[in-house]
Image: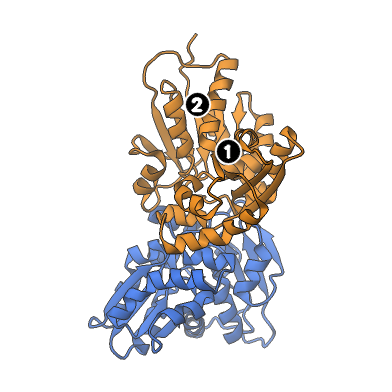
Chain colours: A blue, B orange
Amino acid sequence: MSDTRPIGVFDSGLGGLTVVKALQKLLPSESIVYFGDTARVPYGNKSKELIIEYSNEITNFLIKNDAKLIVVACNTASALALDTLKKNVSVPVLGVINPGAREATKATLNKHIGIIGTVATVNSGAYENAICDIDKSIIISAQACPLFVPLAEEGWLEGDVVEKIAAHYLTPFNEKEIDTLILGCTHYPLLKNVITNQVDEKTILIDSAEAVAREVHVQLSIFDLLNNSGQKGLLTCYVTDIPMRFETVGKRFLGSSLDNVQTVHEV
Amino acid sequence: MSDTRPIGVFDSGLGGLTVVKALQKLLPSESIVYFGDTARVPYGNKSKELIIEYSNEITNFLIKNDAKLIVVACNTASALALDTLKKNVSVPVLGVINPGAREATKATLNKHIGIIGTVATVNSGAYENAICDIDKSIIISAQACPLFVPLAEEGWLEGDVVEKIAAHYLTPFNEKEIDTLILGCTHYPLLKNVITNQVDEKTILIDSAEAVAREVHVQLSIFDLLNNSGQKGLLTCYVTDIPMRFETVGKRFLGSSLDNVQTVHEV
């Protein structure tokens, strides 16, 4: 049986399009409904209560739009709202934390993992909990990098200033001798070059997007939800605002132009 | 006659507390109701339509809370929503653009004024229009500085990195030989030292907060709305979220602790 219903993916803004890109590559037949909460971005500095409220609203919207599985493509919402969402809906719900954590525990050889993310993600301890559930002996160091999101959205991705900001956040990891670093925010892969320059050259960077796509594949198979039509899936995007430089920023994350975008005012 | 109703002040977040601070200093008897839209901050990258919608909602809330005059203490909302707000309400509505523009035209000797602000404020051309209405012969240069807000909220207010970011935005002004620079965002006064370091030493910095307070005084006098009780006014704060590090950030802008804060979910 082939299930043609779309996969629902949401993020606080457009950063989650990196997950869409990975899904399109791995599962080209799957249609995707993407929801970017661009009117209320960023989530990284908001309270837990508000992040749960917004995530609930958006998940319900995606379910109404026939989503057969929900991907929370926002690290902050995954860290703070995933448990609540799983209780509230009947379709499978995946976050980006567990796949990223699993990938990192597989990659580390010296059992020292670093995590970078927003203030909310880092304060939540969600990555630590997920890694600890897999292997209690792993030592974890975490660092919030609040300026990385505005830098990525600005497209300020290289040069002296960005290197210095990255050094400010990342140099302490070198003393801790981590061999694996989780990019715990969908914006951070855009800064991969700079991050690579500022950590020990052998450090493995974990970008959750691909790990999440593989996990989605597994879940769709388990629940017999795969679309086996062989036809190319559609991408439909809903946003809560068309902000300044929307197309430029969207293209930066998705890797191709954003078509078929609709604005919704009431979620 | 003494009018004990409060002055309503709003901003996208907590930056507008710099205006509250200036009002408290100049008009200590006036009570103030402050509204910080912390759940939806920042406005600087949102669309005009959304900024007008939010500003209308908040203004109505302040009117319901008995505001006798409204101060739009957000440059972005002043630039994009002020005209609409003035049409919609019966009390006087003041923005931060006109007072800042007037102050700058008084200060400039060589008739070259620089403006820095968010992307939305700079793109709106609101300062240019306001200055041009006063003196068409003034030459204006404007520059968006999108990283200044996250830096100020971070409290990252000095040091090599901040100097370099400021140099990136501000060095071009020195070629243009401006003698006056408008800090067109309520967050920017926190970066005053860095900004001073990066512009010609004779450049006069215009911080709208004090100019706005003086304008409020004039308007209250004209409309016979002053509170002459001689008693110290109260400050009541409403926010749409209590975000991470709320107290630290609030204190940074207000200069004293924030008491009497209530969260509202529906504006």
Question: Could you tell me residue A207's position as x and y percent?
Answer: 47, 80
Quadrant of the rendering where the C terminus of chain A is positioned: bottom right
Seen from the viewer's position, the closer of residues B105 and A264 is B105
Seen from the viewer's position, the closer of residues B253 and A120 is B253
Q: Is residue A166 visible?
A: yes
Above or below residue A28? Residue B221 is: above
Question: Which residue is found at the position 58% from the left and 36% from the top?
Answer: B96
Quadrant of the rendering where the N terminus of chain A is positioned: bottom right
Q: Residues within 10 Å of mark 2 (few under 14, many from 20)?
A: many
Judged from this view, the residue extending furthest toward the left is A137
What amino acid does circle 1 point to?
Glu
Residue pointed to by mark 1: B57
Above or below residue B76? Residue A91 is: below
C-alpha separation, residue under disc 2 versus residue under disc 1: 17 Å
Question: Could you tell me residue B79's position as x and y percent?
Answer: 65, 42
The image quadrant that residue A263 belongs to is: bottom right
Question: Could you tell me residue B130's position as x and y percent?
Answer: 69, 37
The image quadrant that residue B202 belongs to is: top right
Q: Residues within 10 Å of mark 1 (few under 14, many from 20)?
A: few
Residue pointed to by mark 2: B7
Dot 2 or dot 1: first in sequence order is 2
- Tell me the mark number nearer the camera, choosing from 2 and 1: 2
Question: Could you tell me residue B154's position as x and y percent?
Answer: 41, 56
What amino acid does circle 2 point to?
Ile
Judged from this view, the residue extending furthest toward the right is B136
Seen from the viewer's position, the closer of residues A182 and B116 is B116
Q: Of helix, strand and loop, which one carries label 1?
A: helix
The image quadrant that residue B63 belongs to is: top right
Q: Chain of mark 1?
A: B
Above or below residue A74? Residue B8 is: above
